[in-house]
Amino acid sequence: MELLKRLTEAPGIPGREDKIREIVKKEMDGICDDVRSDAMGNLIGLKKGSGNGKIMVAGHMDEIGFMVKHIDDKGFLRLQPVGGFDARTLMGRRVIVHGKEDLIGNLSSATKPIHILTEEEKKKELQIKDFFIDLGLPSEKVKEIVEIGDPVTLRQEFVQIGDSYSNKAMDDRAGVLVMLEAVKKTKKHPADVYMVATVQEEVGLRGAVTSAFGLEPDLGIALDVTLAADFPGGEEPEYVTKLGQGVAIKIMDSSAISNHQLVKSLKEIARKKDIPYQMEILPRGGTDAGAIQASKAGVPVATLSIPCRYVHTVNEMIHHDDLEASINLLASFLSETNPGDFVPTNR
Ligand SMILES: [Zn+2]
């Protein structure tokens, strides 16, 4: 899991994916016939098949984080979110401010210490705009190193917890890992496979919009994490998926309804190959599949999801078996799929 550690520990807020892109590029260079990036910063790796159509596989490189919005006279930073952290999970966290050099900071909310809070003040709901970063430096020094717009990421380390792995940015570096490992495993495949490590997914699937438009794939598979809300506090019908129960084949979310034939085919392959899987309906949220599907005249798409607990916190947690199942299902799918089979009125 050394690669997953490197992928999740790298910074990369939307629009500033350079460091993570470097890591992914090195991996793609070892697998692909051609690797390039486009104007948006998407990284596109082609692994040639036997010339039978084009499959686009997408996993997003960006992670939720912040930009520096304001530096005050005392040197405290205020934040603009890029992507949706749950403010309740941010108290007392550490961050890295990526200025001229990387600075570690304490994230706190603009509120009095708990010892002197009134009962009324304790009830107030936390909002991102209440948070600030303390860099432990005077304002002049901060302003020498940090500028408005500099990226801020959460500081967290990769750990194995039981049979699971936990870190920030499992969303969606786990998806990027599945893409790389599955294509590595696929020796022969009918279609040309375009691996796309997309940018700016967390702010509206923006990298997938342009990369799908440019590639004109015959079929698209997005890889992303999904909710595994199977922990105390939820009811079973709202779990979406269960951790450790296999790769999730998405039926729908609010960005796309997966192509029905494609869903059927993924299920059949999983059964045939004894790959543990579960079906997923996500009431709210989307993946790059939403952008690929609506590209040009339309593309049949589906999403393979990796169940993840505590999504959009720094403790995102995925299960070893789900990761393995996701890699195996994607690899088997690529090795036997002709994209033409899913387009009744083929172009
Ligand atoms: Zn995601």
Image (cartoon, grey):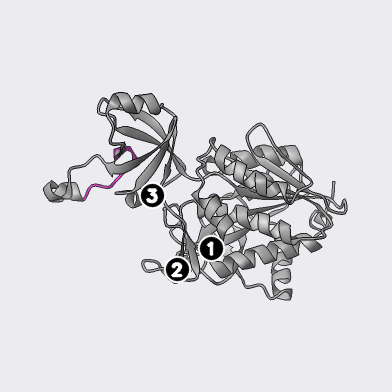
Res. 285 in view? no
Give residue 93's position: percent from left, percent from top. Answer: 33, 48
Who's the residue at 13% across and 50% down the image?
115
Type of amino acid at the residue the image marks with label 2: Asp
Determine whether 255 is above or below 243 in the image. above
Instruction: Please tell me which residue lies in front, 265 or 154.
Output: 154
Residue wearing tag 1: 307
Magenta region, main secondary structure: loop
Q: Residues within 10 Å of mark 3 (few under 14, many from 20)?
A: few
Q: Secondary structure at mark 1?
A: strand
Tell me which label, 3 or 2, sits earlier in the chain.
3
SS for tag 2? loop
Identify the residue position indicated by label 2 in the image.
230
Q: Earlier in the sequence, mark 2 or mark 1?
A: 2
Sooner in the amino-acid sequence: mark 3 or mark 1: 3
- Amino acid identity at mark 1: Pro
User: In this figure, which residue is indicated by the disc labeled 3?
Assistant: 86
| Distance between the alpha carbons at the discs numbered 3 and 2 | 18 Å
Residue 100 falls in image quadrant: top left
